[in-house]
């Protein structure tokens, strides 16, 4: 994702590309990027990143979206419980519209929730989004992933709610509930109960 200047509107926007050096992967990434754009264009919601334009140039497909200058939750550090509740409310609001359409975000994580200039947070990066049901692949940030994602079981709204809970734990404590950096480490991480936030 790049910060760019849109000459047509004279605005600073973010530009997202779906590229790869491998041809088969480039075609897959291009299709996913186009699907992501069209889905987001239909999800007008104040807590979901707004998209503006889709295009194709010599480097491949891209789309532009609103530029959020605020920090993501990864760099926000530990938050007071009142602020954590406000963040979770905003994310839950955006997930509600996705789930009402039978979609699962699959990557609700501290890097994919960012403050906007209005002081509220927005959910972004819908590249891992899929329809409810059994997914064809495993995608996401390991320390926020629900068990059903890893064992290839059917996904639904509860999958994102698990990730939302993991995000809440991270915001309250500054630690991960299940500190796995790789998917291979998750089964061991899930064997131990996270310390209570208090």
Image (cartoon, rainbow, N blue to C red):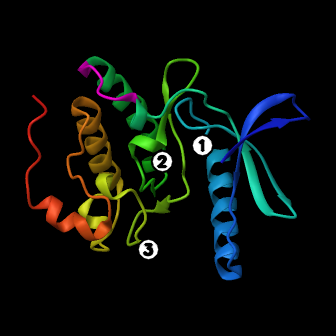
Residue in view at x 67 percent, y 82 percent: 24
Q: Quadrant of residue 145?
A: bottom left
Q: Is residue 75 above or below residue 24?
A: above
CB of mark 3 within 8 Å of CB of mark 1?
A: no
- Residue with the most extreme right position: 8
- In the rendered image, residue 137, in percent from the top left (x then y), is placed at 43, 74
Give the left or right position of residue 153, taking residue 20 as reference.
Answer: left
Estimate how packed mark 1 is, as few (under 14), some (14 to 19) or many (20 or more) residues with alpha carbons within 10 Å.
some
CB of mark 2 within 8 Å of CB of mark 1?
A: yes
What main secondary structure does the magenta stretch of the protein show? Answer: loop
Question: Label 3, on which residue?
Answer: 137
Disc number at residue 63? none
Q: Nearer the viewer, mark 3 or mark 1?
A: 3
Q: Is residue 82 above or below residue 65?
A: above
Q: Secondary structure at mark 3?
A: loop
Question: Label 2, on which residue?
Answer: 98
Q: Counting residues from the N terminus, which is met first, the one under dot 3 or under dot 1? A: 1
Give the left or right position of residue 166, taking residue 198 as reference.
Answer: right
Question: Label 1, on which residue?
Answer: 43
Highlighted range, magenta: 76-81
Q: Counting residues from the N terminus, which is met first, the one under dot 2 or under dot 1? A: 1
- In the rendered image, residue 44, in percent from the top left (x then y), is placed at 62, 37
Residue in view at x 31 percent, y 26 percent: 84
Q: Is residue 100 above or below residue 61?
A: above
Residue in view at x 67 percent, y 70 percent: 20
Tell me how many marks there are.
3
- In the rendered image, residue 31, in percent from the top left (x then y), is placed at 68, 68
Closer to us: 89 or 28: 28
Residue in view at x 63 percent, y 65 percent: 32
Q: Secondary structure at mark 2?
A: helix
């Amino acid at each position: 994702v790049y910060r760019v200047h849109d000459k047509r509107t004279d605005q600073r926007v973010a530009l997202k590309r779906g590229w790869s050096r491998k041809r088969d992967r480039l075609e897959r990434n291009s299709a996913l990027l186009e699907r992501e754009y069209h889905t987001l264009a239909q999800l007008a919601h104040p807590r979901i990143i707004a998209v503006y334009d889709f295009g194709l140039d010599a480097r491949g497909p891209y789309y532009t979206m609103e530029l959020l200058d605020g920090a993501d939750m990864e760099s926000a550090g530990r938050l007071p419980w009142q602020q954590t509740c406000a963040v979770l409310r905003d994310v839950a609001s955006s997930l509600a519209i996705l789930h009402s359409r039978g979609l699962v975000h699959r990557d609700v994580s501290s890097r994919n929730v960012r403050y906007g200039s209005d002081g509220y947070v927005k959910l972004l990066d819908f590249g891992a989004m899929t329809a409810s049901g059994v997914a064809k692949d495993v995608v996401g940030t390991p320390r926020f992933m629900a068990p059903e994602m890893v064992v290839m079981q059917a996904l639904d709204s509860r999958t994102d709610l698990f990730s939302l809970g993991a995000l809440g734990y991270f915001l309250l404590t500054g630690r991960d509930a299940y500190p796995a950096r790789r998917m291979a480490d998750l089964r061991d991480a899930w064997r131990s109960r996270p310390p209570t936030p208090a």
